[in-house]
Amino acid sequence: MKQIYLDHNATTKMEQSAANTLLFSIYGNPSSIHWAGRKAKAVVEDAREQIASAFGIEDPEDICFTASATEATNTALKGLFFQAQKEGQRLHLITSTVEHEATLETAKFLAELGASVQFLPVNPQGELDLMAYESALKTFSKERVLVSLMAANNETGVVFPWEKCALMAREHGAFFHLDAVQAPGKLPNFSLQNAPVDMASFSAHKIGGMKGVGALSIRRGLKLVSLLHGGAQERKRRAGTMNVPGILSFGEATKALSQRDLNAVARLRDAMEERVKKAISGVEVHGQDVNRIVNTSNMLFEGVRGEGLVMALDLAGFAVSSGSACNSGSILPSHVLLAMGRDKSAAQSALRVSLGPENTIEEVQSFVEALTEIIKKLRK
Ligand code: PLP
């Protein structure tokens, strides 16, 4: 049986050039002063420069490598909370109801520690309520305010107007953190150069790099309390010996991003949705009429449960997801779809297909055929 991977928002296959970096005989500790250490440091700094240029980060030194985007987001939110506390201020955090768990769970934790937290609503298409955002910014302008929003939603692909939101935060004297994980390689012209973003989280494994590597860009001069204490790595922002091979793979993966044809992926996704709608009745595509990243489709099939669908598709060789990857294997309704006003049953029934640059129209066609057969059986 042919196996077809359609779950690129969960993770991606490593780019060949990124995988090749793992074979390099760079084994020194970048903190060591001898030749082996200097070699390792040099390649890490090259990767840092490459990543900064790919994401539009002004100064490569703004990048702090982490073990994941989850760690990057924890560093941004908790780091600013503890910094404010040190300076005798309370943190007010503004975020949205549809963020990734890395943000939501950190926000809830900080609320337990005394931060005030506000979750902004979205409309039925998954778009951010900008009026609620503006009024939140006005309400708390005298406190230390941090806004944390995602560039694009991992479940639906719906894009937030993050550049505008960052500008609004700056105008109201608030700090702005962007969860940029799903943007590179999927959102045309993505670059931090376009907006006053104070911090941004990235993940290597979502773009063809190794798992277990992330980055937080931190605008120069912004003070954060470090989560990890120990050595002076990463300019004292994150103690611990760095994942050198992972960082090299991250740098290589960003090089490949510029060669991606985003329009081709968008055409493939649109063709898939069109064929699905033609072949199957009672289909709804979440966020179809609003700005979405090019590769993501979140579909609901009347009378069919997402879990059963994912399992049946798996048996037929297709790797897809029900709701977010982190919910896979559990029957929790998607918090994103609940926030978009869907009921519990609908929020448990969605199917997420996320395409990658290597998928073909033939693969999409065989997926649509398998899906049509499976839905027929499940509806019986
Ligand atoms: N933010 C978003 C939007 C994500 O999609 C993910 C992963 O799915 C993360 C954060 C967490 O990334 P990582 O796997 O690097 O911790």
Image (tube, rainbow, N blue to C red):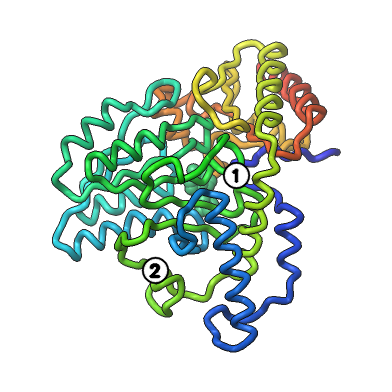
Residue 326 in view (yes/no):
no
For ligand 1, tell me if the residue under mark 1 lies within 8 Å: yes
For residue 238, the mark is: none
Q: Position of residue 208 (x, y in %)?
A: 66, 51
What residue sits 45% from the left and 75% below the top? 233
- For mark 1, give the secondary structure: loop
Residue underneath mark 2: 237
Q: Position of residue 13 (x, y in %)?
A: 71, 50
In this view of the protein, which residue sits in the foreground, 109 or 136? Answer: 136
Q: Residue 185 lies in what quarter of the image? A: top right
Q: What whole-number distance in Å separates the C-alpha atoms at marks 2 and 1?
A: 28 Å
Q: Is residue 18 above or below residue 33?
A: above
Q: Residue 225 lies in what quarter of the image? A: bottom left
Residue underneath mark 1: 10
Q: Is residue 14 above or below residue 342?
A: below
In this view of the protein, which residue sits in the foreground, 172 or 14? Answer: 172
What residue sits 36% from the left and 45% below the top? 196
What residue sits 52% from the left and 81% below the top? 31
Residue 26 in view (yes/no):
yes
- Mark 2 or mark 1: which comes first in sequence? 1
The type of residue carrying mark 1 is Ala
Q: Is residue 85 above or below residue 277?
A: below
Q: Position of residue 153 (x, y in %)?
A: 49, 36
For ligand 1, tell me if the residue under mark 2 lies within 8 Å: no
The type of residue carrying mark 2 is Arg
Mark 2 surroundings within 10 Å by alpha-carbon count, few (fewer than 14), some (14 through 19), many (20 or more): many
What residue sits 66% from the left and 17% below the top? 379
